[in-house]
Image (cartoon, rainbow, N blue to C red):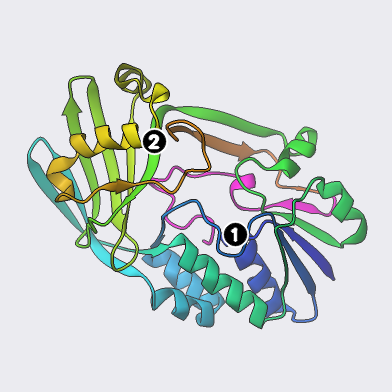
Amino acid sequence: MRVACLGGGPAGLYFAISLKLRNPSHEINVFERNKPDDTFGWGVVLSDETLENLHNNDPVSAKAISDHFAYWDDIALHYRGQRLISSGHGFCGIGRKKMLQILQERASDLGVKFQFESEVSCASDYAKSYDLVVAADGLNSRTRDEFKSHFKPDLELRKCQFVWLGTHQKFSDAFTFIFEETKFGWVWAHAYQFDKNTATFIVECTQETFDKFGFADLTQNESIKICEEIFKDHLDNNPLMTNAKHIRGSAWLRFPRVLCEKWHYENIVLLGDSAATAHFSIGSGTKLA
């Protein structure tokens, strides 16, 4: 069977690995518009349950992921000067770039072929020459849009604004939620370590608070400075960082909730964020689970 995988993110790569493990004779080609080491996120969170699923499916890549993750068992909640701890959860964080490297190497070892910096236009073109087309082309899936009358997607921008940042304040002891009350309303953060020196730091607030701060009219650096001031008691003088210079403006977003009535049409299948999204506060490795 000839398979075209449109998108080389975690979902597309892990699908290619899984299919090769089940039948090495399948010809699988992954088409990715970015370079092999391009990534615009920070860390990825996986739960204990997801790690177990990965190990049962492919112990080789599961071990490689485990060798590079930061693990914690607690969730810490900071609210009005209190630090509340909930234990026994079991999560790990790994850098998105490191995960991509691990999955790319594993897929290549199994015989998967890659075409990086390859812009995909129409899935229907691939459907003519491949037995199966797997559209792992992300949140803004062109495939989902091309066949929207069949997939019947339901897209909704959620109400809160958020910005995805990083910091060298590691938050190594717990997955951390921080709530700070400002003169313009509540602003909160989701923080977790994903390598020896770095943590993801997602800042979120309501649209009303966002508007009062004027974040939409600020540069990324101006926006970051305000966030650093809001969360200064938790950052230990570590700056917040962005790797979203490719995005114009302040880089704040509203979370797009995606649901599709159908995930397949003829020989085309949606996978990962193209088919459904889970909010970053509860995602927990949904792309791989």
Determine which of the numbered discs, if any, sits on residue 104 in the image.
Answer: none
| Circle count | 2
Q: Earlier in the sequence, mark 1 or mark 2?
A: 1
Give percent across and percent down for residue 77.
18, 46
Q: Residue furthest left?
A: 81
Residue 168 position, x and y percent, is 26, 57
* Residue 274 inside the magenta-drawn segment: yes
Q: Which residue is outermost to the right?
A: 128
Q: Which mark is residue 11?
A: 1
- At x 79%, y 46%, the residue is 121
Give the secondary structure at mark 2.
helix
In the image, is residue 102 above or below residue 4?
Answer: below
Q: What amino acid does circle 2 point to?
A: Gln
* Image quarter (top left, top right, bottom left or bottom right) of the N terminus: bottom right
- Provide the residue designation for mark 2: 220
Main structural element of the magenta stretch: helix, strand or loop?
loop
Q: Examine the structure image and report whether residue 180 is included in the region drawn in magenta.
A: no
Please give the range of residues in magenta: 266-289
Q: Secondary structure at mark 1?
A: helix
The structure residue drawn at horizontal position 72% and vertical position 80%, both measured from the top left corner, is 111
